[in-house]
Amino acid sequence: MRTFRIVLAVVGILLGLFGVARLVTQIPSYSLMWLAVWLIAAVAIHDGLLSPLVIATGAFLRRSVPDRGRRYLQFGLIMGAMVTVIAIPMIYRRNSQPESKAILEQNFAGNLTLLLGILGGLTLIAYAVRVARDQSARAGQPAGDQRDA
């Protein structure tokens, strides 16, 4: 197992170095400068805005949502956030490219709304299944042995 990890680490480092070499040799320095600015801004936005927002949301949910429902709500929020983060640039860039680049011609705002609705519905169904299972398990217990959820 140790040898496998070492080989995996070496392969990862070599692939990373190959990527950096390709960036430096094939991308203009002006574009590399903007890439560096973008990466620094991404770290600043993540650490200064998104991480505190996620921590505050988690603390709020901990205080206001029961344990059984919280895990499903957190799952739905995390999945919805990941899908939204992917869709926002495509919504913003819609109609900015020629028609030959057809991927940006879709209605991403409508698709995002539909996907978030599906995620919300599936999360709600999963929670309902959990509640039904808990109730059927309680129905099989003696009357004095029932627990609160």
Image (cartoon, rainbow, N blue to C red):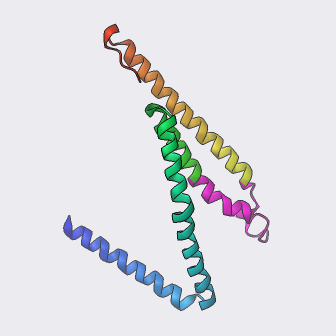
Residue at 34% over, 8% down: 143
Q: Is residue 140 left or right of residue 112?
A: left
In-front residue for pair 41/91: 41
Which quadrant holds the N terminus? bottom left
Residue 122 painted magenta: no
Describe residue 59's horizontal placement relative to residue 5 as left or right: right
Residue 125 visible in the current orientation: yes
Above or below: residue 101 compared with residue 14: above
Q: Position of residue 115 (x, y in %)?
A: 64, 46
Which residues, given as a range, are shown in magenta? 82-108
Is residue 142 visible from the viewing direction of this image? no
> Left or right: 133 with respect to 111?
left
From what the image shows, is residue 23 above or below residue 84? below
Dividing the picture into quadrants, the one containing residue 9 is bottom left
Residue 60: image location, x then y, percent: 52, 42
Furthest toward the left, the residue is 2
The residue depicted at 65 percent of the width and 40 percent of the height is: 117
* Residue 13, quarter of the rendered image: bottom left
| Residue at 59% from the left image edge and 53% from the top image edge | 83
On the rendered structure, is 64 left or right of 98? left
